[in-house]
Structure formats: structure tokens, C-alpha cells
Amino acid sequence: MLTNVDKAVGELSRLAGTPEAAQAYIEAIEKKRIEERFIAYWQPYEYERRVFEAFTPDTKILVVCGGNRSGKTEVGAAITTAWAEGREYFKGEKAWNWVEKLPIPPKPAKNIWIVGLDFNVLRDVIWREKLFTGANHPGFIPKDDSVTNVRADDKQIFFKNNAVISGKSADSGREKFQSASVDLVWIDEECDAEIFDECYQRTVDCGGRIIVTVTPLTDISSGIKEPWIYNLYEEMKAGRKDIKFVNLSVLDNPSVPQEEKAKLIQKWSGHPEERARLFGEFIRRSGLVYPMWSRKAHLVEPRLIHKDWMRVVSIDPAATGTTAALWGAIDPAGNITLYKEYYKSELVVSEHAKNIRHMRGEDPVDYWLIDPKWAQQRNAETHKTGAQLYRDSGIPVRPALVGEDYGLNASLEYMNATVADSSRHPKVWVHRNLVNFQEEIEHYVYDSYAKGVLKGLSKEKPIKRRDHLMNAFQYMCAMKPRGRERLTKVYSEEERKSRAASNSYF
């Protein structure tokens, strides 16, 4: 008994003249169908399947790290298109085996963003090469009735299920990213942190997701203002479960010829960017200043500070940028406990001084330290020194006594002593609620050469970026404060509670 397919082939053979011609006609039809609905046929390579396995329902942010031609952008384009089309579009299709694993909500998405670094990248790489024209394969956006309108100039794609994909340029500024809820954001390469923050806010109320595809060339010591992708990586390592990272290597990509892979290996061998370019791994161009820093060892829960311990407040001022102040209590053994921080920007000296005095409250302060270089600079309008401006505002600062390294080596001694059991040097502990101090110390690195034969090598001095509390910490350590003799009075538990309630310890 002839099947419908057999009958169709027979009819095509009659019309085409021979069975071979009919088969060629069928293959041409199938080829055309694949080109028009490529996304329904597309299959990730075996090494790319790790991305789909990682994108579980509890994933809020998925970061796909890979070098050039590792396949990361294709994966981003495929997932984004699948999100717009919805699950029903793929049932019964070859692509269902990977679409089924994605946490696409049953209700079709309404708002999807694709974020490129600038307009040219958005237009030439993402829009033309990946979504529509295609380079090594047809574009991912189907050419069927599931897409109702394409506005190329506005970079918008409208779908029959009411989903809309909007292309956005990161260099247009954060104001362009203030909008309604967004179900999915695909960010290609590392934009500024403020753009990521705006994108994240757009996904909060609707439970949206974020995909980032990136070659991780920006570490904590280079590139953009704030290395937010590296920060996400640190958060994941610290235990945050809704962030996932997947590395893709160009050397695993079967579409890249072996001779080209050999050339890539030769080109990047020994280069500081080798691991990022070939394997999508984070690189650190220069080392952390405080590699011994340990949240487990150095952080302590906020605790009572004895009223008779020496108190030092160290200030790192700025004319227009961030002014930071750090409170330290020195016990009789000379150990330093950092227990308060002040961190504000864009205020004049009198306003900073007022805020610092308010934050001090009834807390006794024995020494007020300030950046010695800034203390000597004269204000252009009043011709007063920086130190005099603070004194006039009620804070009796004195220039910190620092050496050529501004107290860096002294601070390293305190930090090392905390983790070295045999050390007799005084230690340092940090109250857990000093969040800005933690952020700075975990991203405080030595500067590196940006070009030339020394590119990527350390200059052996810390990079000047978000180091305000680090400076204040070093001024304090350079002082090598000595605590008062151990007190003889032992307070009862009732007295301790009474003094704590009256702020006598803080």
C-alpha cells in the first residue's frame, strides 16, 4: 500500500521526469525550509550543551565565557530567539531537545532586550550576522508567519505571540534602559556596570533572566570602571546559587579548522590574555595587594568596643569624588578592630565633616588622621589647606605620618598577622557590616603596564581606583598605634548591657 509520501514522490517524479529529479526537488524544498526556520533545526555542538544544562529554573544570571569563535554568541542568539518564539513553537521540531531544557515560562515573553556594546556591534555582529543574514549558517530569526514585523532602523522584531525583541546600544547611556518589565536580557560583551544594573532592575518584578556572553578580558585590575562580571563570578564562588558560569573554548569548536586552532595557540601562547582568548577563563593581569585577605579570618560580627580602648579615625578626603573615613579601635595588645566606615561622594568639606561628626555620635576619638598630601594642598577660593578646612568644620585632623609607600607595608604586616598563628605582630579584624571596605580590599590590585613588551606585568604599586578606604586603612597602620594598658576592672554582664544600651562602648 502506497503511503502519502510515496504518492507525493510519484507525482513529483511524473512532473520532474525522473525519481532523481524528484528527490533533488524534495531536498531543495527541505533546504529552503531549514533556511527559513533554521532555529527549529539548530543543534548545539556537544561542548555547547553545557550552557543549556546550566540554565536551570533557579538561574537568574547565566554568564557564558568564551574566546573569539568559541560559539558563545551563537548560543546567546539561539536562546534569545527561542525565548521570543516560546516553547510551543518548537514542539515536534528537531530543536526541541535543547529548547525543552530551557526555563522558558509557559506564557510567552512580552519584552526581550539584546544589548550590544555600541551601535556598530549591534548592527553588524548581532543583528545582521547572527539574527538575520547569518555567516556560517542562516539567521536565527525565522522567515515565517511567527514574525509579524521587523523594524531594522529601530532594531525591533515583533512576533505573532506579542513578544518583542529590542536591540539596545550600551553606549547610549543608562537613561535609554529605563523602561517597563523585561522578561529576558541578552548582554553581549562587558558593558559598564550601570547598564547592567539598569537591566537587572527591569527583570526584578517579572522574574526575568539575564544572559551574558563575554570574552573575559576585564579583570579586577583593568578595563572598565567596575568589573561587574568578575564580581558576579566572585559572588558565585562565595555561594550565590542563582548565578551560573559556563566556559566555552574555541579549541572545542568543530567548525574552526584545525590549522586555524594551531595558529590561535601559537598567537596567544605566553600572552597574558591566553587563558581568556582560548578557554574563556578569567585572567588576573596583576596580583591582589592583600592576597592573604580572608573573610573567614578577618571578618567578625559587630561586637562591643571597650570604652577605654584607643580610637582612631582615618580620613581619605576628595574635593569632588569619594571621601572615606575609617574608625579603628586599638586594644591593649595593639590589635586593630575596624568598626565603622563613612563613604560618600560629591559633597563639600563642611558637609563631609558634618556627616562624619554625626556618625561619630558619642564615640570618643583620640586621633583624627588625614591624607598628608591633601592636608597640605590649599583651596583655590579660601587659600586654606585641606587640613584647616576640616579643623574649621570641627574635626581636629592631623596629617598621617606615612613613608614612601603611604603605610602599605605596615598594613600588610597587620593583615598577615591575623592569618599567621605564630606571628607576634598585632592583628586586624573588620566588622562584617563594613561592606565598602570588603568591596575595596577584594578588588585592590597592583597596577600593570598597558602596552609594550611589559604589557600585563605588574608595576609593583596599587592601581588608583576605588581605594579610598584602603588609603585610610594604610594611614592608620602606618601610625602603628599602641593600645593602653590592659584594664583591671571587669564589668558584670548587667553593666555591659547597660553600657551598650547607653552607647558607652561605641
Image: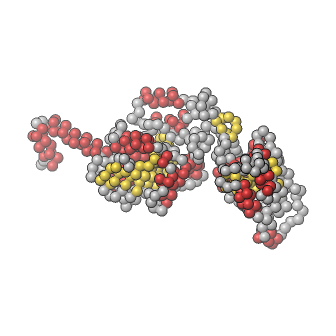
Identify the residue shown where x is 58% and y is 53%. 239
Toward the viewer: 326 or 263?
A: 326
Residue 226 image point, x, y percent = 59, 47
Q: Quadrant of the C terminus?
A: bottom right
Toward the viewer: 254 or 351?
A: 351
Residue 37 falls left or right of residue 12:
right
Residue 79 falls left or right of residue 373:
left
Residue 84 image point, x, y percent = 37, 53
Residue 181 falls left or right of residue 34:
right
Residue 448 falls left or right of residue 106:
right
Query: Can residue 60 be seen by looking at this rendering?
Result: no
Identify the residue shown where x is 63% and y is 33%. 449
Query: Can residue 217 be seen by looking at this rendering?
Result: yes
Residue 92 image point, x, y percent = 29, 52
Identify the residue shown where x is 60% and y is 28%. 452
- Residue lying furthest front: 381
Q: Quadrant of residue 11?
A: top left
Residue 501 image point, x, y percent = 76, 70
Identify the residue shown where x is 43% and y is 54%. 184
Q: Quadrant of residue 373?
A: top right
Toward the viewer: 52 or 280?
A: 280
